[in-house]
Amino acid sequence: MRAADAEPEPESPRRLMLDFLHESKPLRAQELLLTPSPGRSGARELLGWFQAPHGATHVRVSLEAGSAPQLRKVDMHPVAERDPKCHPLANTPRWDTYRPPFPIERVVLPASLEPLADELRDVRVEWVRQPRSLRKLAATVLGSACAIDPRWVEPLDLRLKDVELVAGACLMILDLDTFASLARRAGALDVEVRTTRAAHEIMSARVQYADVPTRGFALMDVLPFGVIAAGRFVARALPAGRAWRAYAHSTDFAELLTSETPSAARSGDVLAAIRAIGAGELIVSDVPWLAAGVFGPALAPRLAAHLLRMHLALPLEDCVQYWNRWDDAQVVLRDIADLSRRYRLLRPVRWASGPTRLAHLGVALQPAAARRRLVLRSGRIDRCAVHDGVPPEPMMILMKSFAREVAERTPWAVRHLCDSTLVWQFDTAEGLRYAVHYDSAETLGPTPEAGCLRLRSDDRRRSSVEARGPDERLMPLDVGVHGDRSLEYQRDLTHAVRQWIEMQPG
């Protein structure tokens, strides 16, 4: 769905209610959040995606009551099922498990990428202009993480063997088109970059390999990727045909990110790949130029900036993980019910339902020595009404991370959590067929409740968590296009909950 807002720069997303009907019979209702498109300025375009239930023939659209100003226009376009997916319960290792080829203390980038300065303000970056020779280039990037400006290739008469030689002593990023032209010139790989465009269907990237450049994502996560140019969604990739597979096998190139496009024939191509050379590494990827806006506004600018930092092997907190909303509430409730099989310290629990027809469910982290109970109440997780509940995906990641802290008996967990039962409690009006798979909350025992933190979503634009009293936190409602802001959301949520736990009297 595309919409035009009556306000040039809307301060908050717009919430719609969609009532799906089969002829005149109601099927279900669903909330839809419209977020500003990163590709427009001035009269802001809003984007949103929804999946109609089976059998729906009509949909009734209504703006949230009391919301002003009104939308000027709403257009609906049929598209294929969206590709972006997350795996919040994936058993990802700590991010420092992945190591770059050597400690990164310097980042060397071409001056043409200086629009990235704000994203890298906490890093020592050397912005360089074209070196005078190959020898000077090698001396400049030695022992650094760097990117090679495509405009340097012709003046320096760079060949593929030159790039491989220099990459053996640094962590080098080369854009897709430059790599393809150098490989063709060397007779190593006959391939050309392929660009895919679509008017209404986005491009995405699938995480194919877990390593330093893809930290922050679970394996097989699919994230929004590419740019918005001339009102169309655009991404370019190296075709992953027989020629690429033979070349990758002979040179030990590993695919990091592959494409997901509206066309099955144009999916699975290479968006990023990595190869170890000598003491260094060569990464073939458009990510630095994508993050800098060279090809146009990025569809998911924050995720592009995060991928850039990971490509450069910069630090990452363990609590950070990508997420976006799942469309199917049945899947979410089923996965939460399956938690105890994946993480032995976590148990799905339920309380008696009241007259509101909402299921009261939760997840308990219960160490053996628990003598008190701390509760996180996140409100409703379903999408069939307008409410201020927090999405389930970041809460699942949060509970998973706390379970690891307790299992590993980290110093923080020993001091603040190993003597407590931590309960995440939520409500839902959807996916109730799986509620019977949750244990009764009475099995948690009679440990007294020592504190309760209320988590709520707020529709004002926020970049971080906000406190409203000592036992309430407001989270941003808008997490961007398919989870573009999810990484900072997860970081802020984790920090806020940890600080609250630390404040609870022992």
Image (spheres, grey):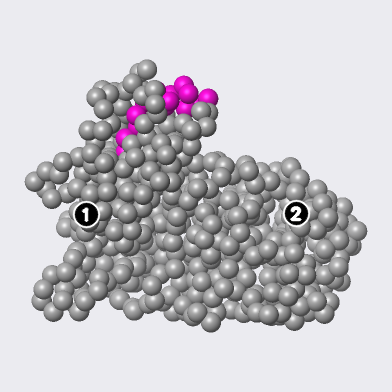
Give the labeled residue for mark 1. 432
Picture disc at residue 400: none
Residues packed near mark 2 inside 10 Å, few (<14), some (14 to 19) or many (20 plus): many
User: Left of 274 or right of it: where is 4?
Assistant: left
Under circle 1, the secondary element is: helix
In what quadrant of the picture does the N terminus appear?
bottom left
Q: CA–CA distance between discs 1 and 2? A: 50 Å
Q: Which quadrant is home to the C terminus?
A: top left
Amino acid at dot 2: Leu
Q: Does residue 159 belong to the magenta stretch? A: no
Name the residue tied to disc 2: 171
- What is the secondary structure assignment of the residue under circle 2? strand
Please state the extent of the stretch shown in magenta in the rendering: 411-424
- Residue 421, x across and y down, in percent: 34, 29
Q: Are marks 1 and 2 in contact (CB under 8 Å)?
A: no
Q: Position of residue 400 (x, y in %)?
A: 43, 42
- Residue at the farthest left position: 355
> Mark 1 vs mark 2: which is more N-terminal?
2
Q: Position of residue 367 (x, y in %)?
A: 40, 29
Left or right? Give the position of 366 relative to 405: left
